[in-house]
Every structure is written in structure tokens, then in C-alpha cells.
Image (cartoon, grey):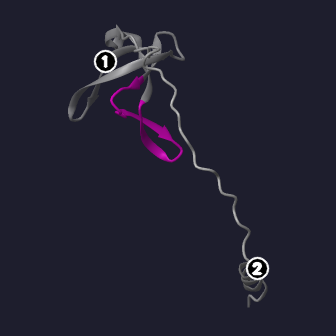
Amino acid sequence: MITGEITVRSCYGDAVIPVEIYAKGPRPGTVWVRALNNLEPFTKMSHGGPYQDDTAVWYIPLLRNVQLVAEEQPTAEEEQPVAVELPPVEQPQPAPDWFLEMAYEDRTYLE
């Protein structure tokens, strides 16, 4: 995973946002970034109006502290199958006749 930081300016001041760089952008010199730590700092527009999102296209020279972070690989010792015992599945019982008759009467005697 490639991580970095971006600075987003707002009326309240500058905010440093940790991001993950996950794809090449649609234009030269851009990348897709995803905000980390469950942040949604990017405002986007849709047909229903503005909304907050965690992804955006960002210009590469504006990224700071870009690092390659190694993702932890599970070892064979940690990876053990989980045994789950499920109770036997009960077959559903058919509806009683009186219930079916009530449903039929409710539908046929509407005024």
C-alpha cells in the first residue's frame, strides 16, 4: 500500500489528511487517493446536491510524505480453518387451513 499526506484548506484552516494512493488518475500527473482513518474530506456534486466522499483525483506534486507500507501477510500458523457446527435445518411447516381460509376471506369480502 502506498500512503501519503495531502493538505486541504478550508475556512477553518489547513487540515493534513493521510491518504492511500490506489490507482493512476484519469489525466497525466494525477492519482486516485482514498482518505484513511474513515475520513470523508472531499466534497463532490451529484444530481441530489453536494455529498462527502473518501476518494478523489489528486495532483501528484501536491502529495507529501509518500511511503510504501508493507501489508502484513498471514503466516501458515495464524491461518487455521474455523470449524463451525450448524444445527440441523428444520423444514418449514405448511400453513394451517384456518389461516389460508382467513386470508382468502379477507381478500374476497372487501367492500
Q: Which residues are magenta?
A: 34-54
For marks 1 and 2, give the CA distance.
67 Å
Residue 5 bears which disc, if any?
1
Going by the numbered disc 2, the residue's amino acid type is Asp
Going by the numbered disc 1, the residue's amino acid type is Glu
Query: Whole-percent x and y of residue 18?
Result: 31, 22
Front one among 27 and 86? 86
Looking at the rendering, which quadrant does residue 35 occupy? top left
> In the image, is residue 47 part of the stretch drawn in magenta?
yes
| Relative height, residue 27 to residue 13 (above, below) | above
> Is 72 displayed left or right of 84 in the figure?
left
Q: Which residue is mark 2?
A: 97
Query: Whole-percent x and y of residue 1?
Result: 42, 14
Query: Going 41% across and 15% down the picture, which residue do you hit?
Result: 59
| Relative height, residue 105 to residue 88 (above, below) | below
**Mark 1 or mark 2: whose residue is earlier in sequence:** 1
Query: Whole-percent x and y of residue 36?
Result: 35, 26
Q: Residue furthest left?
A: 13
Front one among 35 and 11? 35
Label 2, residues with CA under 10 Å away: few <14, some 14-19, many ≥20: few
Specify the quadrant that holds the C terminus.
bottom right
Disc 1 is placed on an element classified as strand
| Relative height, residue 34 to residue 2 (above, below) | below
> Is 28 displayed left or right of 1 in the figure?
right
